[in-house]
């Protein structure tokens, strides 16, 4: 248990959300990406589930309490053929030290090819394309064991009463 208490505070959690455009879709291989203070980087594969080639725009969304973005995501824009995967790399910026668990959202937006029709506007409509259970719970501090975490109470021995 002591090892777990030492390891958890230096984990950076990413909640991978997919936003889609029309019928196009980019699907991350996992809803959560872990990045620790020692390896300082992590990768995730994103699958183009559509039947045509699309651009994948990857971006990081900082939380309101964060003063600045502590991460770099690369590539931010890439072409992904239908049914193929693109590997996205997330790196902790130089000089950043993780002293507690953090969470940041990664957005994957699929941008479809031009359909060749003139005098027509195409709008980007975003929606969450995951399970409701993939959405993060609010952060809190556990008074019993001292751990912080978005889903600590659900995964450990603490249960809500009432």
Image (cartoon, grey):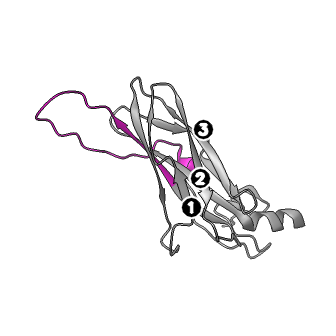
The image's mark for residue 29 is 3
**Residue that appears at 63% across and 46% down:** 43
In the foreground, 160 or 56:
56
Judged by its main secondary structure, the magenta piece is loop
State the residue position of label 1.
Answer: 71
Residue sitting farthest toward the left: 119
Whole-number angstrom distance, CA of label 1 to CA of label 3: 20 Å
**Residue that appears at 36% across and 31% down:** 23
Q: For the C terminus, give its image quadrant.
A: bottom right
Q: Is residue 123 magenta?
A: yes
Work out whether 24 lies above or below 90.
above
CB-based contact (under 8 Å), mark 3 and mark 2: no
Whichever of labels 3 and 2 marks the residue nearer the N terminus, that label is: 3
In the foreground, 37 or 143:
37
CB-based contact (under 8 Å), mark 1 and mark 3: no
Residue 17, x across and y down, in percent: 50, 48
Q: Secondary structure at mark 1?
A: strand
Whole-number angstrom distance, CA of label 1 to CA of label 2: 7 Å
Residue 140, x across and y down, in percent: 64, 71
State the residue position of label 2.
Answer: 90
Q: Quadrant of residue 41?
A: bottom right
What span is in magenta?
106-134
The image's mark for residue 48 is none
Work out whether 22 lies above or below 158.
above
Q: Secondary structure at mark 3?
A: loop
Q: Secondary structure at mark 2?
A: strand
Depth-wise, is mark 1 or mark 3 nearer the camera?
1
Q: For the N terminus, give its image quadrant.
A: bottom right
């Amino acid at each position: 248990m002591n090892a777990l208490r030492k390891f958890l505070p230096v984990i950076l959690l990413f909640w991978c959300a997919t936003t889609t455009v029309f019928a196009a879709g980019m699907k991350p291989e996992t809803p959560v990406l872990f990045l620790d203070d020692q390896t300082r980087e992590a990768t995730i594969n994103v699958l183009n589930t559509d039947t045509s080639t699309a651009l994948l725009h990857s971006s990081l969304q900082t939380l309101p309490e964060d003063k600045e973005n502590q991460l770099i995501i690369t590539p931010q824009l890439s072409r992904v053929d239908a049914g193929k995967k693109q590997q996205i790399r997330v790196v902790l910026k130089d000089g950043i030290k993780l002293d507690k668990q953090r969470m940041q959202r990664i957005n994957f937006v699929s941008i479809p090819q031009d359909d060749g029709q003139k005098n027509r506007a195409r709008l980007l409509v975003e929606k969450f394309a995951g399970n409701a259970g993939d959405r993060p719970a609010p952060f809190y501090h556990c008074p019993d064991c001292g751990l912080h975490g978005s889903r600590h109470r659900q995964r450990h021995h603490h249960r809500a009463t009432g």
